Image (spheres, rainbow, N blue to C red):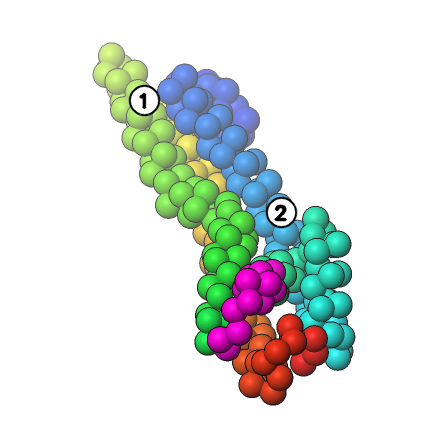
Amino acid sequence: MNSQDMSIISLVLHASWVVQLVMVLLLAVSVASWAAIFRKLFGLNRVKSLNDDFEREFWSGTSLNDLYASAVQNAKNAGPMERIFASGMREYQKLRERRISDPGTLLDGARRAMRASFQREMDVVESSLSFLASVGSVSPYVGLFGTVWGIMHAFTGFAGMEQVTLATVAPGIAEALVATAIGLFAAIPAVIAYNRFARDIDRVAIHQETFIEEFSNILQRNLGAHPAPAGTGH
């Protein structure tokens, strides 16, 4: 390579095949990481919007039975909070159909159903986080491997030279360092996105856990006020 031709594209094209393979791998990981970031960004915004919409409807005074009927009818497009509510109501009504009237049993059954639904919903919300964490932690080391290999390859090429100058060394070293730069290019956005999404998911989890407790309190009040009918209001 011409010692004056130090553009990024030229450095990549003149790198050894191992370093080029590392670069291609890191670029592919970077593209996948950005795709996961945008998918998670839109997904979390949708979850927040659906949860807020359902919570507003829940506290608007609509009866629990009407909310449950709407949740069942809208199951495919429902948000996590609505599905959690539907799970609790479904279990509550099943227990009432079995002639179980003990308030503690009814409340425990509804709460267990909502906790199980909560775990399923959080598994979905947390998807892709582990991938972003892996990209953020592994990519710099993959880039460093490419750099070390490139430097070794460059110095092997200099072994037969009688006189080695900075002009002859610089291109080979620069080619190798590009791998580390690409590794950091892949890792930094993944780390930033992971930290941002982790905080957002924690807020979603707390919000949903708070709703479970509030809904459980409503069921408990309804059972204490009139234990015979299935809860119809709050």
Which one is earlier in the sequence, the residue at label 2 or at label 1?
Answer: 2
Which quadrant of the view contains residue 149?
Answer: top left
Residue where numbered disc 1 is placed: 154
Tell me what residue is drawn at x 61 percent, y 78 percent: 228
Residue 166, position in %: x, y? 34, 30
Give the residue type at disc 2.
Phe
- Callout 2: SS: helix
Start and end of the magenta stretch? 90-103
Relative horizontal placement of residue 177, taking residue 100 as reference (left or right): left
Give the residue type at disc 1.
Ala
Q: CA distance from mark 2 to mark 1?
A: 39 Å
Residue at the extreme bottom: 225
Tell me what residue is drawn at x 54 percent, y 55 percent: 121
Residue 46, position in %: x, y? 68, 56
Name the quadrant of the C terminus.
bottom right
Relative horizontal placement of residue 202, taking residue 72 as reference (left or right): left
Residue density around tag 2, few if under 14, some if 14–19, many if 20 or more, within 10 Å: few
Q: Is residue 98 above or below residue 225?
A: above
